[in-house]
Amino acid sequence: MPKGNNYITSEGFKRLQGELSNLIKHERPNIVEIVSWAAGNGDRSENGDYIYGKKKLRQIDSRIKFLTNIIEDADIVQPNEKINTEKVFFGAYIKLIQDQKEKSLNLRIVGQHETTHEKHYISWVSPLGKSLLGREKKEMVSIDINGIHTNYTIINIDY
């Protein structure tokens, strides 16, 4: 992944570092211990602990490699005091109203590897994220997703 495309907030970066640290210091050693114990129990071909442990170990190693690559290529975007807080930029917290429903929606624009539905964090490269970047308060944003046309009005922007 080329540097410059992997934008991430400092909070997201710390979360990924924490996950990587937990995998390396806790989860992986625990699984290695289980696999070592299971390997000493004889026939490995029918040993569920051994088979499951090796599979889990491969998953952990794959996640460690993935996280390492993301962290190494991360371009951390720090909040800037000079930012125009009247416009939507990376890291912004945004309150929208969907025109037809008059229902509010609170979002944050973040990096691709820190999106979560629970916190309503959306990626800056998502269709809605792209359409919000650079917009101002009270501006309407129209978006088509899977053939469904929706209009949103930006009510508030915060950093």
Image (cartoon, rainbow, N blue to C red):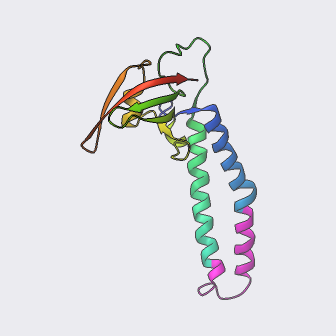
Residue 42 on the magenta span: yes
| Residue 145 visible at all | yes
User: What stretch of residues is rendered in magenta?
Assistant: 29-50
Q: Is residue 108 left or right of residue 103?
A: right
Instruction: Please give the name of the residue rendered at 47% of the width and 22% of the height, measured from the top-left corner.
Output: 88
Find residue 14 and report its image quarter: top right
- Of residues 17 and 140, which is closer to you in this image? 140
- Of residues 86 and 100, which is closer to you in this image? 100
Q: Main secondary structure of the magenta part?
A: helix
Residue 71's spot in the image, x, y percent? Answer: 60, 40
Residue 89's spot in the image, x, y percent? Answer: 49, 23
Please say if 31 is above or below 154.
Answer: below
Instruction: Please give the name of the residue rendered at 34% of the width and 27% of the height, measured from the top-left corner.
Output: 141
Q: Residue furthest front?
A: 102
Please say if 69 is above or below 135.
Answer: below
Please say if 73 is above or below 48.
Answer: above
Residue 44 on the magenta span: yes
Residue 117's spot in the image, x, y percent? Answer: 50, 46
Instruction: Please give the name of the residue rendered at 47% of the width and 34% of the height, measured from the top-left corner.
Output: 2
Q: Is residue 100 left or right of residue 57?
A: left
- Of residues 39 and 101, which is closer to you in this image? 101
* Count of numbered circles in the view: 0
